[in-house]
Image: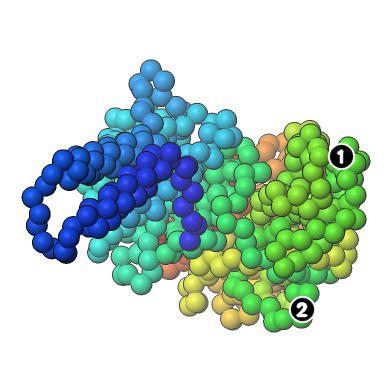
Amino acid sequence: MTSASPRRFDLSLIGNALALLALAALAVVAARSQVEPWHWIAPGRGRAWMAAALVAAYAGFVAAVAVSRKRRAQREALPQIRAEQRGEWLIAFASQTGFAEQLARRSWQALRDAGVDADLAALGTLDAAQLSQYRRALFVVSTTGEGDAPDSAAAFVRKTLGAAAPLPQLGYGMLALGDREYAEYCAFGHRLDHWLRHAGAQPLFDLVEVDNGDAGALRHWQHHLGLLAGRTDLPDWSAPAYAPWRLRERRVSNPGSAGAAAFHLALVPADGSALQWRAGDIAEIGPRNAPDEVARWLAATNLDGAARVRHGDDESALAESLARSRLPAVDAAAGKSAQALADELAPLPHREYSIASIPADGALRLLVRQMRRDDGRLGLGSGWLSEYAGIEALIDLRIRSNPSFHAPADARPLILIGNGTGLAGLRALLRERIDAGHRRNWLLFGERNAACDLHYRDELEAWTADGRIERADYAFSRDGAQRVYVQDRLRERIAQVREWVGAGAAIYVCGSLEGMAPAVDAVLREALGDEALETMAAQGDYRRDVY
């Protein structure tokens, strides 16, 4: 669980302490002035003065406490939302113990730090009319009791949640807090999500469930937050506990593609430990800065990259510490020793990738698209994995369980839909299903060119030929006179979708959050109806891993 932000030091606390000390001192003097303990003596002038001093000290103490509480309340008060200065984004929370509010405040501050104009409000103070004023909204809500809303959201539940509302302009994200030990896990978050979907609001990504403050789920929420804000360099609220993995293989998966290069990677634990994860799980990677960037920074500061610095019980060269950290401004290093600088370094934020393999493959496999920043530099994660890390280099990696994208254990039919590097997550699901002997698999996949962009081509064609994939439909947008995408191929197969779902099929979607995921969702709603698709989602038969 993330820890609360440290409170700012309040000078009124000094007043409280001094008042208490004064009271204690006066009490001691008063006690010593008595001839016998507990024996009343008529007060003289001295005792009258002492009594007055005690009253004054107590009054000062009460006043100091009041000032302290007032200042704290002012600090913690929600910023007022003004109709004439309303932000484009809204962060709304429903909190029972204060944790949801803390996370909402962090999310709000992260957006503001990224230059996003956002408002912050308690859900219980809002209604549908106010929600309709926003283009984007993020909800951070907890569940209490037997699936109930927090007390602070009672007004919203009573006045708004039971009525229909038109919110077609709203894109939203949902962070649902709960505890899996309770039967109604994250129930209020799911109820609010269901209401928003019925109001026509569009989910920006799938609901993120947090089991008892799970740090990995919160990092996943923060990952989405950074993508939405256009700031993938937002610092992690809690850094993953990485283990060293060794990069064993790297090759371009789509040579000759019109798009950016995608790389097939294979990694194994450096200590030789057993491979353990489920299809659908996520690899969190600790990226590194480009070596030439670190070298230029060291040259500009005249610091020795070979100088040894300590981080707790660990020791490394300064250059190695800089590679894993945000590079400070050059002038911030002026006059500082290597150790003093190292003590102030902040780690680079993690990157998330769908795992493309299962443990039986003998390695953790990834499919990583090489991304570039606005200034032309390679992206932090993709640059490290596809360019800067050498074969056999150690990679910081942590596997995060992602049960919301695990395949069903039974043999029900499975429809897998995706595009681009989203095929990685679908490939792992197919591999797990095939190993279990489940052959009713239908793959719909979209990319640019058939000649070079069908990742895992040999495998997919072999699985289709021998019936382990019952059906495969591909859309290659750059191969014809008209652009055809995977959602178009899906619409052409609506009758078959209804047939498969009628036979109990589950639907899994992996790939682009922009474009593909909402377009596929729209086609599925057209094919099955809103109510049926939302029922499938509630039952775990419609799942998405989109980014």
Identify the amino acid type marked 2.
Answer: Asp
Q: Is residue 318 left or right of residue 542?
A: right
**Residue found at x 38% / y 17%:** 84
Instruction: Please identify the residue farthest to the top as the structure is shown.
Output: 84
**Residue found at x 85% / y 65%:** 393
* Foreground residue among 410 and 13: 13
Q: Residues within 10 Å of mark 1 (few under 14, many from 20)?
A: some
Where on the picture, by quarter, is residue 78?
top left
Identify the amino acid type marked 1.
Answer: Thr
CA separation in Å, label 1 and label 2: 36 Å
* Foreground residue among 497 and 433: 433
The numbered dot on residue 271 is 2
Q: Position of residue 344 (x, y in %)?
A: 70, 48
**Residue found at x 49% / y 56%:** 3
**Residue found at x 76% / y 69%:** 245
Relative to 312, does residue 63 appear above or below in the rendering?
A: above
Q: Is residue 327 left or right of residue 233?
A: right
Q: Position of residue 104 (x, y in %)?
A: 43, 45
Looking at marks 1 and 2 on the same chain, the residue that comes earlier in the sequence is marked by: 2
* Foreground residue among 53 and 315: 53
Q: How many marks?
A: 2
Relative to 496, does residue 154 appear above or below in the rendering?
A: above
* Foreground residue among 309 and 328: 309
Where on the picture, by quarter, is residue 242?
bottom right
Q: Position of residue 543 (x, y in %)?
A: 49, 59
Q: Is residue 494 left or right of residue 463?
A: left
Give the residue at mark 1.
Answer: 301
Where on the picture, by quarter, is residue 143?
bottom left
